[in-house]
Image (cartoon, helix red, strand yellow):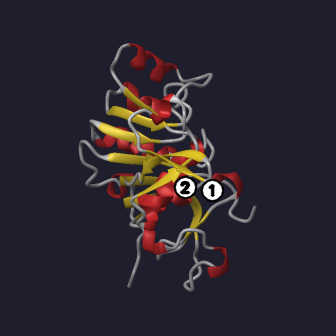
Amino acid sequence: MINKFVRSIAEALEGVKDGSTVLIGGFGPVGQPNALIEGLAEQGAKDLTVVANNAGTGRTGLAKLMELGRVRKIVCSFPRSSGSVVFEELYKAGKIELEIVPQGTLAERMRAAGAGVPAFFTPTGANTLLAKGKEVREYNGRPCILEEALPGDVALVEAWRADRWGNLVYRESGRNFNPVMAMAGKCTVVQTQHLCEDERGLDPETIVTPGIFTDRVVHVPYGDPQS
């Protein structure tokens, strides 16, 4: 019988290796799998490439992972924000690499990875520094640059509710990057706020991420399941 629930954060993150590319869901703190990020800090994997919407805030979560020296490179759209103190310190000291990717392109690169598309052309970033070193072609009179798919060795995702098959639903803006990252991860690890106790599983009409994209699910309770 398929049951993708695991008993602990440690079990959920078992096998994450040094040098992995880790996709981390969320838009800032919204929909971010904070328990899994903290667990990764404890797990000890290093030399990581992290893909996220931003470069963390304060000194917790992703920022803590960077401060511990576990992150070699970050791929994101917004490296600087009002609280991105750790990233700025590390970047100024030359201790972390940065690849800036426009937000829509970032999402599409991961969606492409999940769909088995190796690369695509987009006008976003053409005639800017972001196009440096990339193939350029003209479509309908517009220059477009070639962007490669962006898969992850591991994807860390937060869901609102999950069933034992690994089917996922999200709540409102908590959906953000999580579905495309779930598709793009070779091993997708999910922290879910609520469990579906119905033996029939989630209502198929509500499922956003099918269980085929999910490998492990850990319950991190939060909030009212009926709200």
Q: Quadrant of the N terminus?
A: bottom left
Q: Nearer the viewer, residue 115 or 128?
A: 128
- Where residue 209 appears, as percent x and y from the top left, is 54, 68
- Asked whether the beta carbons under mark 2 and mark 1 sit within 8 Å of each other, the answer is yes
Determine whether, in the image, residue 210 is placed left or right of residue 214. Answer: right
- Label 2: how many Cα within 10 Å (few below 14, some 14–19, many 20+): many
Give the SS element for disc 1: loop
Give the SS element for disc 2: helix
- Where residue 4 appears, as percent x and y from the top left, is 41, 71
Determine whether, in the image, residue 43 is placed left or right of residue 116. Answer: left
Determine whether, in the image, residue 40 is placed left or right of residue 179. Answer: left
Residue extending farthest to the front is 141
Q: For the point 58% across and 73% down, which residue is it?
A: 196
Q: Is residue 130 above or below residue 115?
A: above
Q: For the point 42% across and 63% down, which residue is it?
A: 117
Q: Nearer the viewer, residue 7 or 174?
A: 174
Residue 170 image-quadrant placement: bottom right
Q: For the point 34% across and 33% down, which residue is it?
A: 71
Measured in 3D between alpha carbons, the distance from the residue under mark 2 to the one under mark 1, in whole angstroms, is: 6 Å
Q: Any mark on residue 175, and which? A: 1
Please give the residue where the numbered disc 2 appears in the rendered image: 178
Q: Is residue 171 above or below residue 34?
A: below
Tell me the kind of residue under disc 2. Answer: Asn
Tell me the kind of residue under disc 1. Answer: Arg
- Label 1: how many Cα within 10 Å (few below 14, some 14–19, many 20+): many
Q: For the point 57% across and 59% down, which residue is it?
A: 159
Total numbered labels placed on residues in the image: 2
Determine whether, in the image, residue 192 is placed left or right of residue 118. Answer: right
Is residue 111 at all visible to an observer of this figure?
A: yes
Is residue 26 at all visible to an observer of this figure?
A: no
- Where residue 111 appears, as percent x and y from the top left, is 50, 59
Q: Is residue 195 above or below residue 21?
A: below
